[in-house]
Image (cartoon, rainbow, N blue to C red):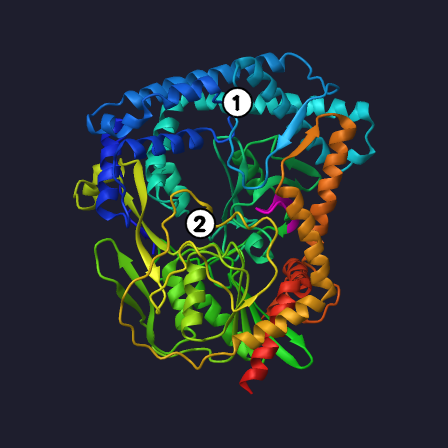
Amino acid sequence: MIVFCNVCFSQTVPFYTKAQKLTGTFGLYHYDPFQLNQKTSQEVTELFITELDNRAMTIKGSDLKLLKENSNTFFDQINSNNDSYIEKANTVYLKALKTVDSILTVLSTRNLNFNENDTSYFLPYGSKKIVYSPTIKYHTKRLERYIKSKSYDRVVNTDDYDKLTEAEFNAKAQIFAKTIIANFQKNIQEEVKTSYRYVESTLLNAIALRYDPHSNYFTEEQNQEFNTQLSAQVESFGFFLDENEEGIISIANIEPGGSAWMSNEVNEGDAFISVKIGNEKITNEELNAYEIQDKLDKTKEDKILLTVKKQNGIIKIVKLIKQKTTSVDNSVKGYVLSYNNLKVGYISLPSFYTDMEEHNLPGCANDVAKEILKLENDTIKGLIIDLRNNGGGSMGEAMNLAGIFIDEGPLFIIKEKNRKPSLVKDINRGSLYKKPLLVMINETSASASELFSNIVKDYNLGVIVGQTSYGKGTAQSVLPLDTNLLYTKNKDAVKNNVDFIKITNSKFYRLNCSTHQGNGVVPDVILPPTPGYSMIKENKELYFLPADSIVKKVVYTPNPKLNTQSLQSNSAQRVSASKDFKRYLQITDSVNDMINKTQKVVLKFKEYKKFKKDNDVIFNSLERAFETNSNTIKCLNNTFDLKLEQVNIATREFNSKIIQSIQKDIFINESFNVMNDLINQKK
């Protein structure tokens, strides 16, 4: 459960004081704090170096050596009020930035040679290997190769690249190279101005990450981003962009109920590639995130084509419309799936949203309840809740959602450091829905999604279908770095604070006293895995908290057990015989083979063009692999929304695409079949 305490800390405080406050607070409240010694000193500095430059675009081998010197005394220095490590780190990093700036200046004065046999390497997906340049000469060549590769990427992202001759292709690449160098250099020069703040925040965050992968240090700006609730009163396309220190642009936030949310094809963390606004195509190499966001906010165009890269490498081109969201109402939408006189409700929930500022406003659980009432009017026999790619959100909303399906009783067990486990109960008596229930999850369903799924399992409320989930069974609180400010009456001190921490202070457990932490929720009915997602797991993260168990007496009344073995057996037979799933498995094998090995490409016209085409063929086929060719089920608006849709042409057109997407999804189709089996079991 995430708790937010919006108070602050002075900028003028020495680094060692901030580090002492951070380790002191974590020592008191973190679920499993570590000892501050030589071993953990070295581990923190290794995390710091990785976080500082995880692609080694700035730091060279000689810089690495300096940053590792005496790293095992880091905590000794901190406890002795000594800031020598961060001062050295800032000096090294600042010098490295200026070296890169100088290299870019040289590269900007000449045309790059696209006819030599430069080779670019792509490490296996999920690889954390970092190779540092041994010399400045090597680093210069490395930056040149990077710019060439990005220039070629930019050319092949244009609509007509396949028609270009070699001379035209290289001429375009040369133009893009100038833009890439200029943007790269601009980012470097901005970093030079703020290097100490960046080094400081990265080092403080590295200390937090050593405790576990979900603990963090936040600057004031980062805390505001973390707390951001997208405006409910302005027109937007429903997403916000952000850019990290390396210039990589990604989807930072998605507005509940907005166009991106409703598309069910855009997720937080997706990499931004380009957006087409009218006749103008803007890429991730031309403008920074803030400039692109400004264009999106100010454009009078009401439609865009957004191109993003999913975490598993799939390229998605999504049509979005600009619209005003007046409240969080209707942020989820219920549809009716129909086949052979069987009607099943379908609701996709991309995140467990709530209003962080107006606590009296309803969140996603209330919105889901409204949709269920609409669907009940269409005489549905069962309900599918789709939590695929739902990375979590408000634990309170997950609890409220579970309360829709159970009458009363405990929901889960929570345990904080040095405290006895305690039961968390459903505070709302009575249940809204008692018919068959199916919950869809996949490898990136996490946290609140897993909490809800386990409640469904414990009470035998329904069946879980999909792939084993991410495995996050911890809860965090957000506090000021200086926790004394929680109690101060000094409003100026609170107002001027700029430092926050997110701290993992508890684990949650199922009613049988086990936890999915590190292991994930295992579905009752297992479907084929999503390619590229095998590395996206809690237990792949450094310093994750391992699974354990507790002892706690729990009294509750579950529903009768479901025959999940029969459901799994029937599903496995269908999947094995399905042409759609055979095609899906063949394509996913090709994708896994490609992303699980080091790829190399010669940075020349013919070779790069072939490399791009070969990759596009695989990833484009993967996107189609999720679509069924049989069109077994029909997806329809619920009757209530169908009437409302008639008055808005743009919404109707947009909603039509969502319906097509749902209808073609092979995993939704199979989930419908599992629901049919479940309904027949209950007859």
Q: Which residue is mark 1?
A: 186
Q: Is residue 320 visible?
A: yes
Q: Quadrant of residue 582?
A: bottom right
Left or right side of 670 for 505: left
Q: Residue at x 26, y 65 (%)?
A: 422
Q: Is the residue 132 above or below the residue 480 in the image? A: above
Question: Pointer 1 and pointer 2: residues touching (CB < 8 Å)?
Answer: no
The quarter of the image holding the C terminus is bottom right
**Residue that numbered label 2 is attached to:** 539
Q: Amino acid at mark 1?
A: Lys
Q: Nearer the viewer, residue 622 or 228?
A: 622
Q: Mark 1 against mark 2, which lies toward the viewer? A: 2
Quarter residue 401 falls in: bottom left
Magenta segment includes 432: no
Q: Relative to residue 153, is residue 123 drawn left or right?
A: left
- How many neighbours does mark 2 have within 10 angstroms: few (below 14), some (14-19), or many (20 or more)? some
Task: Name the spot of residue 420 as percent of width and height, x first.
Answer: 22, 61
Q: Can you give x and y, in whole percent of width and height, for residue 570 in the image?
A: 62, 74
Question: Residue 65: where, in percent of width, then height?
Answer: 41, 20
Query: SS of the residue at dot 2?
Result: helix
In the rendered view, would you say 582 is above or below 463? above
Rendered location of residue 395, percent (x, y): 37, 60
Q: Amino acid at mark 2?
A: Asn
In the image, which residues are magenta?
A: 304-319
Quadrant of the snapshot with the N terminus: bottom left
